[in-house]
Amino acid sequence: MRNTSAGGPADNSPAAGPAEDPTGRPAGIRSILLGSSIGTMLEYYDFFVYVALTATLSALFFPAGNPVAATLLGAATFGVSYLARPVGTLIFSPMADRIGRKKTFVATLAVMGAATTAIGLLPTYATIGVAAPVLLVVLRIVQGIGLGGEYSAAVVYVVEQAPAARRGRYTSVLQGTASVGLLVALLLVLVLRLALGDEAFASWGWRVPFLVSAAVVAVATVVRLRMRETPVFDEMRRSGTLSKSPVAETFTTRSSWKSLLLATFGAQGGTSVTLYTSIIYMLYFLGDVLKVPASTANLVLGAGILVGAPCYPLFGALSDRIGRARVMLIGIVAWMVVVYPVFAGIRAAATGESWVVVAALIAVLAVLTAMVMAPLPAFISECFPPRIRTTGFGAAQQLGNILFGGFLPLISLSLVAATGNQLAGVGYSIASLLPCVLVTWLWALRRESRMRTAAAQPDPARAVGV
């Protein structure tokens, strides 16, 4: 029987996953999810620490005198990491398809963790002048290279261990741990600010969140080194069907290009816009546009994230039942309908210091963002065959992030500065989602429906005993 999800690969044989217990849960799934999700958590922890500290880093690493320019430079430095991610994808994703998923995400974790830790050790502009922002940008690029191969290898590792009927549920856990990373980053920065005070935090306290990464990377590396390669990759290696050139195979065939465009615009684009607006830009909006104190902004955003986090496995499981594209389309459309009123409501509530209302409105966006994000890992993975799965996944993810996400905070803040309209950035996010809605509705949803219908038809070969 064919896989019922869009673009389902032919890996539903007994070798496609580990043995299952009587409940249908794959053996060792908890350790598989733990080892795979640590890198995802660290990825989102790292870049949200940077977002939460943008104002502090801008003051420490860029020339003083123009706070608006410093904020925009800080946002641009955030975006630079996304330009580097495709380089990491070209290096590490083909490696995962050639030499193994496990070896690759051990290497990417080391690169990512080393760069993050080094940021916490950097001298500031006052100490070494213009070399400070240059080194910051270089380390953000190295960070991006590591991140470019991390997530795709981790997702494919889980996909190839999970039963086909539960891929959405299990891979959505990776997306849920992204929320954990965001929440931990927020809480750690908030606790440090409150415990140390503004002067000590600006002097040395800002380094602590970056240095903490070193301990997390050490633990995660030990866990990952103990993990086994996926049975799908082992079978391809034994049968000699590994791709000799995953990059060429991904970018030179018509079928791969169709899958790449579908995954980029139908899944990754929607995820990038909703996540980066609801969480990343939200912090800029609260702090830089509405001038909400940093500790308060972190607290209300953390509360919203906490509400949305448990929704990931629920929406992932729902995508197993009714289809990935359908769940994502509902989430994207609902998000587009409510996002402008939600941001307007947040502005009004923040003016009146009604912080419970602000947190509740952020939670609405967090839940809808979870609905868009949860099916994404399984959806994109199922767009590509196993031999180029990691390369295809990584390419779609990075292309989507560059087109839709990495520079969204910078563009949104620039629109606010240029127009004087505090909600101008939200209009940009809504417009960015229009191609995602069209691709998901006109292409992904119909393709998925056809495959589910075909899967439900009886197999004539089986009917005659062939």
Image (cartoon, grey):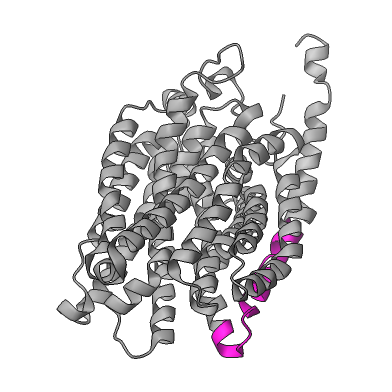
- Residue drawn where x is 32% and y is 72% of the image: 57
Q: Would you identify the image quadrant in which residue 38 lies?
A: top left
Residue in the foreground of this view, choosing between 83 and 314: 314
Q: Is residue 395 magenta?
A: no
Would residue 345 be seen by someone viewing this image from the given angle? yes
Q: Quadrant of the C terminus?
A: top right
In the picture, residue 140 is in which quadrant?
bottom left
The residue at the point 69 percent across, 70 percent down is 345
Q: Where's the N terminus, which quadrant?
A: top right
Q: Say which quarter of the image contains residue 50.
A: bottom left
Residue 432 within the magenta-colored segment of the rendering: yes
Taking 449 as reference, is 42 left or right? Answer: left
Which is nearer the eye, 288 or 157?
A: 288
Dominant secondary structure of the residues highlighted in magenta in the image: helix
Residue lying furthest top: 465
Residue at 53% x, 47% y is 393
- The span picked out in magenta is 415-439
152 relative to 114 in the view: left or right: right
